[in-house]
Amino acid sequence: MPTASHKLKVRKAYQTLAWTAFRGATGINGLALVIICVFLFRNGLSAITWSFLTEAPRDSMTAGGIFPCIVGTVLLSVGSMLVAFPLGVAAAIYLNEYARPGRTLRFIRLGINNLAGVPSVVFGLFGLAFFVIFFGFGVSLLSGVLTLAILILPVIIGTSEEALRSVPNTYREASLGLGATKWQTIRLVVLPAAVPGMLTGAILGLSRAAGETAAIMFTASVFYTPDLPTSIFSPVMALPYHVYVLATAGTNIDKTRPLQYGTALVLIALVLGMNLAAIWLRARLQKRR
Amino acid sequence: MAMNRKIKDNIAKYFFLCTALFSILALALITIYLFIEGLPIFKVTSVTDFIFGQYWYPTDAAHPEFGIATLITASLAVTILSSCLAIPLGVMTAIYMAEISTHEVRQIVKPVVELLASLPSVVIGFFGMVVVAPFLQDVFDLPVGLNLLNASLMLAFMSVPTICSVSEDAIYSVPRELKEASLALGATHWETIRKVILPASLSGISTAVILGMSRAIGETMVVLMVAGGAAMFPTSLFSPVRPMPASIAAEMAEAPFRSNHYHALFATGIVLFLFTLIFNIIAQHISEKHKQTGAATL
């Protein structure tokens, strides 16, 4: 039957066509990532010097370095992690170890999913109204840390839950069978086995907080502050906000281009570095299993 | 002794329940404080005037106008336009990862998509300003390159990872038997994808699309930096626009504390929050109602 084989050929040709389209679409994503990284790397590298990384901005931010921004971003992201990590892990323990399917669980899941979907600028507004004004913390490290902590909480809950889920049930059964209580089982058996997976989540949360701009622009970061933060009530400079400020505000936008590229490169190196570390850690864990 | 252990066990349980409830508390507080700071604007203007009013002149000394129709339109325009790009791109990448690529290729593609998701929005906005804007200006001979099209392009790359990873999960969850049955009947792999796998994972893909749109409408830094910032209805792809998040982020610093302008920005935040909330609830509804539970539900 020549027609049938001809038809099959046509059908195969359609498949080849579709495959090409799918490969193309996937390629575009890769290309976008590569173009952005290569572009920032090529333009930003010349700005990166030791003094750029270790000095404060000078001459109304048209010269000097970005040291206060690096310090600010590290403090903000590590601080928010210290708040959100224990909370997120504990919530994940409830969801994975204690909760039974039912209305409470659905309600909690609805809350977490919707919290994850809140736009970052709305977190910023909330932080302004609640921490900055209501609690009177002012525009400060503390307000920023607490706002960011709520923002990254869903990320940490999600990855911690995944880590707990991947602990085999036989571990729990063995421990319970030996007479341990549920709490003892979780503390001494389940948690130690899940810690590496949770670490992945912690790194992802850190990187998310480090790159966040809209949530800190009303709560923690300022245009320019000559001093490094001295207490949790000090306002800070931060890398993402610094990129935004240099690129949009002020009269010397073209003059500060090298600084902008340099700051963006430091930020992206920090964020992508942490993400690569998380991906590597996860791959290692999967191999071990 | 046994009693003591039992009590400890119960304390632990309720402690963990409380931490799990914290997310709901946070969500409730966010809603409450947005409304506390946003509602006072409706003493000066009515809800309909606020939402359908075409003029946004919050700083006009004599006759301030608080109408956010142009801002809402701009938000919807960038969201829809970016989705037109992000949906095909994201879903096709998901199909490639789940169905076509070899295991080794997938080990590379998946991290690439994850890294794309992790790029800080301010960096993407910066890229749009210094690379895409001059490019559009040259190619289309425009006065400025910061416009609706530029913002939509940049937003598309921010929602692709969301759409891609959620769709991929949906495609994975299609039961093997369905696929094998189709292949055994003589369909090619592409025909199987088109007529069996895609229809079976449609609900999951819809969820992915809505979550991607929710991400796009709430994204702030990109629209703040590259959308152009004009509070007008867009008339072409190259119109500068001012989506809601851009307006909030740009003006909050200069709005006097608890002035009408300040309250109006919070009220804009309420509208934005409601949009994303509705998107998310629809997404969850679809994924729960149409959950694939075994081969029989196709």
Image (cartoon, grey):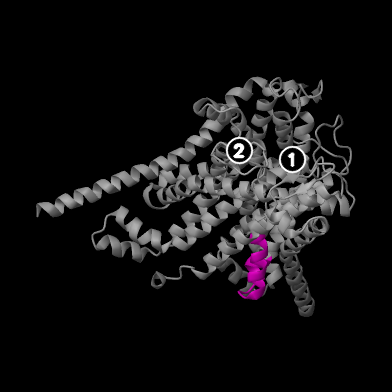
Labels 1 and 2 touching (C-beta < 8 A): no
Q: Is residue B160 above or below residue A32?
A: below
**Amino acid type of the residue tagged 2 in the rendering:** Leu
Q: Is residue B207 above or below residue B125?
A: below
Helix, strand or loop: magenta stretch: helix
Chain for mark 2? A
Which residue occupies 70% across, 41% down?
A210
Q: Nearer the viewer, residue B163 or B165?
A: B163
Q: Position of residue B168 (x, y in %)?
A: 47, 54
Q: Is residue B233 above or below residue A182?
A: above
B239 falls in the magenta region? no
Which residue occupies 82% across, 43% down?
B255
- Which contiguous range is marked in magenta? A94-114
Chain for mark 1? B
Disc 2 is placed on an element classified as: helix
**Amino acid type of the residue tagged 1 in the rendering:** Ala
